[in-house]
C-alpha cells in the first residue's frame, strides 16, 4: 500500500524536513529535490492552517521546531 506524505505524523515530517534542510550546505543537490520541495509545500500548508505566517522566517522556524525559540538554541 502506497502512502502519501500527508499520511505520516506531522512531527515525523517536521523532523525529516529539518534534517534534510540542515544538510543543504553539504549536499546542494537537495535544493533540486522534488521530495524536499513537496515536503516543504505540505508543511507550509499545514503551518498556514494553524495561523503561521510562513513569510516571517521566525514564525516558520518556530513552528517547525515545535514552538522552540531558535534564538535560545
Image (cartoon, rainbow, N blue to C red):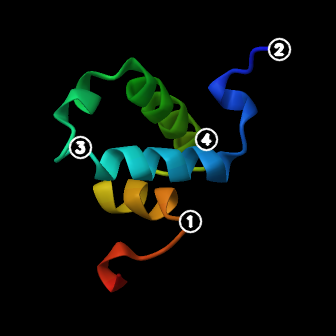
Q: CB of mark 2 within 8 Å of CB of mark 1?
A: no
Tell me if 25 is positioned left or right of 33 in this view: left
Q: Residue at x 52, y 39 (%)?
A: 43
Disc with the residue nearer the chain's start (3 vs 4): 3
Q: CA distance from mark 2 to mark 3?
A: 31 Å
Tag nearer the camera, 3 or 4: 3
Q: Image quadrant for the C terminus?
A: bottom left
Residue 66's tag is 1
- In this view, the residue in front, 19 or 66, is 19
Q: Residue at x 48, y 56 (%)?
A: 64
Mark 4 residue crowding within 10 angstroms, few (<14) / some (14–19) / many (20+) = few
Q: Residue at x 35, y 74 (%)?
A: 70
Q: CB of mark 1 within 8 Å of CB of mark 3?
A: no
Q: Provide the residue designation for mark 3.
A: 24
Label 1 sits on a secondary structure element that is loop
Q: Provide the residue designation for mark 4.
A: 49
Q: Residue at x 48, y 38 (%)?
A: 44
Q: CB of mark 1 within 8 Å of CB of mark 4?
A: no
Tag nearer the camera, 2 or 4: 2
Amino acid at each position: 500500500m502506497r502512502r502519501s506524505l500527508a499520511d505520516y505524523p506531522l512531527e515525523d515530517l517536521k523532523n525529516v524536513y529539518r534534517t534534510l534542510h540542515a544538510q543543504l550546505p553539504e549536499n546542494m543537490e537537495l535544493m533540486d529535490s522534488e521530495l524536499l520541495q513537496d515536503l516543504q509545500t505540505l508543511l507550509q500548508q499545514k503551518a498556514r492552517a494553524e495561523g503561521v505566517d510562513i513569510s516571517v522566517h521566525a514564525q516558520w522556524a518556530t513552528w517547525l521546531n515545535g514552538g522552540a525559540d531558535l534564538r535560545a538554541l
